[in-house]
Amino acid sequence: MTVLFGTVEYFEREIYNYLNENQLKEISEDSLYVITSKLKKEILYDFVCDERIRLECLENLTYAISMITQNKEAVGV
């Protein structure tokens, strides 16, 4: 299945990939902050697009982070 840049699924995958690549076993607020900052910078400065799409990407990133945070709390990590 192809996951398109900017979707909630894309950002979830990117967050989990970052955690795996850096061998982080748990999701901490610090790691989420680092990942979020990196992705926001990419959206704001590297991704050339219409402003409407940029805002949609930022909203999707925020939603993906909230979903991951909720999953973390549900699991009790």
Image (cartoon, grey):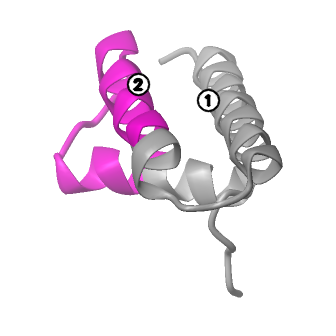
* Local SS, label 1: helix
Q: How many marks?
A: 2
Q: Which residues are magenta?
A: 15-41
Label 2 packing within 10 angstroms: few (<14), some (14-19), many (20+):
some
Amino acid type, callout 2: Leu
Asked whether, in this view, residue 45 is left or right of residue 76, the answer is left
The residue at the point 74 percent across, 41 percent down is 60
Asked whether, in this view, residue 52 is left or right of residue 67, the answer is right
Where is residue 37? Give x, y as percent.
38, 28
Where is residue 77? Give x, y as percent.
47, 18
Which residue in the protein does label 2 denote?
Answer: 32
Q: Is residue 18 magenta?
A: yes
Q: Quadrant of the N terminus?
A: bottom right
Dominant SS in magenta:
helix
* Local SS, label 2: helix
Asked whether, in this view, residue 52 is left or right of residue 11, the answer is right
Where is residue 71? Give x, y as percent.
67, 28
Q: Residue furthest bottom?
A: 1
Cβ atoms at labels 2 and 1 below 8 Å apart: yes
Asked whether, in this view, residue 4 is left or right of residue 16, the answer is right
Where is residue 53? Give x, y as percent.
77, 52
Q: Nearer the viewer, residue 73 or 55?
A: 55
Label 1 packing within 10 angstroms: few (<14), some (14-19), many (20+):
many
Which residue in the protein does label 1 denote?
Answer: 65
Report the Cα–Cα distance between label 2 and label 1.
8 Å
The residue at the point 76 percent across, 33 percent down is 59
Q: Earlier in the sequence, mark 2 or mark 1?
A: 2
Q: Quadrant of residue 10?
A: bottom right
Q: Is residue 21 magenta?
A: yes
In this view, 43 is above or below 29: below
